[in-house]
Image: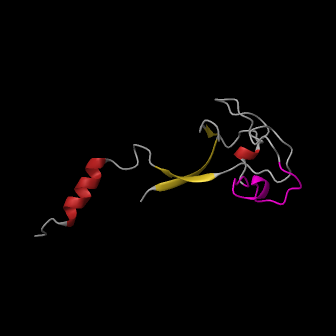
Amino acid sequence: MLASRTVSRCAECGTRLTTLTEPLGRCPKCGAELHACKQCTHFDPGQRFECTQPIAERIPDKRARNDCPHFSLRVTVERDASPGSVRPDEARQAFENLFKKRP
């Protein structure tokens, strides 16, 4: 079974952000603002004003820093598919053991 982990990624470059990243700061790789609509959990282009929260007016630049009180840094759950998690030969051996005749 694959393990999972919760991570935050920069909406511009995809860099994984550390848990200690200051949400009012910038991405360490590309310099994108982190306290911006594009980085927020509530950002949804299909919603009114592109936000799932009840905001009074639309924020025009979704990449620019803003002072929205509803801001929450987007966190996603990803599969941990690191190379050390399952080796191909282990999977093959487990498959062959299923059909091995027992004495």
Please provide percent x and percent y for residue 7: 61, 48
The residue positioned 76% from the left and 39% from the top of the image is 22
Please provide percent x and percent y for residue 26: 73, 33
Q: Is residue 47 magenta?
A: yes
Q: Nearer the viewer, residue 25 or 46?
A: 46
Please provide percent x and percent y for residue 41: 71, 53
- Above or below residue 54? Residue 102 is below
The residue positioned 77% from the left and 35% from the top of the image is 25
Q: Is residue 11 left or right of residue 101?
A: right
Q: Which residues are magenta?
A: 42-58
Please provide percent x and percent y for residue 3: 48, 55
Q: Is residue 35 left or right of residue 92?
A: right
Count of marks overlaid on the render: 0
Outermost residue, bottom side: 103
The residue positioned 75% from the left and 53% from the top of the image is 50
Outermost residue, right side: 56
The residue positioned 71% from the left and 40% from the top of the image is 20
Q: Is residue 80 left or right of residue 53?
A: left
Q: Identify the image quadrant of the C terminus.
A: bottom left
- Above or below residue 78? Residue 19 is above
Outermost residue, left side: 103
Q: Identify the image quadrant of the N terminus.
A: bottom left
- Indicate how the structure is coloured in the image: secondary structure
**Prevalent SS, magenta region:** loop
Q: Nearer the viewer, residue 67 or 19?
A: 67
